[in-house]
């Protein structure tokens, strides 16, 4: 967008915020669906509005607009006139942008306790386009500042930081396994995901070639299965309510596994990490939703990986075979 840009330049566009380190990946994804990037401000890419949010966008600015401002006070006043809550994504003129943010009502920056719902109040995002214009979007896809979910962490219970990915996924989908649920965790070692599920009271079957952390393996509601996840027949495990997977595996291989589990009726609710090595295989990622439905997201706790989630409000009935595996 040129200097002296007008509101019309943003018509039909959305802002897509890439996670730190993944601007190229998001740009590739957008180009792959025919959405050329019109212009970029730091990690924020503006491209034609898509019906499906790109997986690598950590936050989507749904209705960006250009707001001319005469001063810092004027900028804050104009944003405040739209709504109360704003989060700054600063790409240019950082000091001036921060002064506008500081002149707005405060928005809580407190980390979330796992189990608490995401903030409900609409949170807009803004950035300085130049010294005399803000780009602001009152509606964004994430209720968290720049799509970053920060939790009050548990430094003692979980044996790895992977538990934060599952906390984030469960927070976003808004439902969690409970004491009557049987969960299978594929690629479970050392046990971060298993710890989350076990803490929620679910029965967990933890599958990995490597052993769990002994404290996790010793939990009364955890059963460890040492072996290859790819040669496991889900029907041997009985009824399964949730499948979580964080296996180090090629995306296409993981999709084959999930498709087989789906055909066996073992995929009532699923949260799975898709890991990439080297170049991101966008076609392989898209194949998950094309074949199995659900959604793909880069969670703020993901690295070079995406999370595929399929959590139907009304999942298919539990397999009638005996589900008591403990
Ligand atoms: C990122 S780690 C999982 C971390 C775990 N989710 C946690 O929360 O602590 C990936 C795991 O995949 C396991 N893995 C890789 N290939 C496997 C296979 N074919 N069968 C079972 N586990 C496998 C590895 O042993 C490793 O423990």
Image (tube, rainbow, N blue to C red):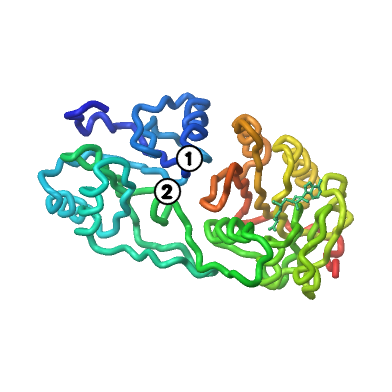
The verdict on label 1 being within 8 Å of ligand 1 is no
Q: Quadrant of the C terminus?
A: bottom right
Which of disc 1 and disc 2 is earlier in sequence?
1
| Label 1: element kind | loop
Q: Residue at x 75, y 46 (%)?
A: 262
Q: Residue furthest bottom?
A: 220
Q: Residue at x 66, y 36 (%)?
A: 277
Rendering coords of residue 88 (x, y %): 31, 51
Q: Is the residue under label 1 in contact with that under label 2 (CB below 8 Å)?
A: yes
Q: Residue at x 15, y 54 (%)?
A: 77
On screen, residue 96 above or below 193: above
Real-space CA distance between mark 2 and mark 1, rounded to the nearest whole angstrom: 9 Å
Residue annotated with mark 2: 141
Q: Residue at x 39, y 62 (%)?
A: 120
Residue annotated with mark 1: 53
Q: Residue furthest front?
A: 95
């Amino acid at each position: 967008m040129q200097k002296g840009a007008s509101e019309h330049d943003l018509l039909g566009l959305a802002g897509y915020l890439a996670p730190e380190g993944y601007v190229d990946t998001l740009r590739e994804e957008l180009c792959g669906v025919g959405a050329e990037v019109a212009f970029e401000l730091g990690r924020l890419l503006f491209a034609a509005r898509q019906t499906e949010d790109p997986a690598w966008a950590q936050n989507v600015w749904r209705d960006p607009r250009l707001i001319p401002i005469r001063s810092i006070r004027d900028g804050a006043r104009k944003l405040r006139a739209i709504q109360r809550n704003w989060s700054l994504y600063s790409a240019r003129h950082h000091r001036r942008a921060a002064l506008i943010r500081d002149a707005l009502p405060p928005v809580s920056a407190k980390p979330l306790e796992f189990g608490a719902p995401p903030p409900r109040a609409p949170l807009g995002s803004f950035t300085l386009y130049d010294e005399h214009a803000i780009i602001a979007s009152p509606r964004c896809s994430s209720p968290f500042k720049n799509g970053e979910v920060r939790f009050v962490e548990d430094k003692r219970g979980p044996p790895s930081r992977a538990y934060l990915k599952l906390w984030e996924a469960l927070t976003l989908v808004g439902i969690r396994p409970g004491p009557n649920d049987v969960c299978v965790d594929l690629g479970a070692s050392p046990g971060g995901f298993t710890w989350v599920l076990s803490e929620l009271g679910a029965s967990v079957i933890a599958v990995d070639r490597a052993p769990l952390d002994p404290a996790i393996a010793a939990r009364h509601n955890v059963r460890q299965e040492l072996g290859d996840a790819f040669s496991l027949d889900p029907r041997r495990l009985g009824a399964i309510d949730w499948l979580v997977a964080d296996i180090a595996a090629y995306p296409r291989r993981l999709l084959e596994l999930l498709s087989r589990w789906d055909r066996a009726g073992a995929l009532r609710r699923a949260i799975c990490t898709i890991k990439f090595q080297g170049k991101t295989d966008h076609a392989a990622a898209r194949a998950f939703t094309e074949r199995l439905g659900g959604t793909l997201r880069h969670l703020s706790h993901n690295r070079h990986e995406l999370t595929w989630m399929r959590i139907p409000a009304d999942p298919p009935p539990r397999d009638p075979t005996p589900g008591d595996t403990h």
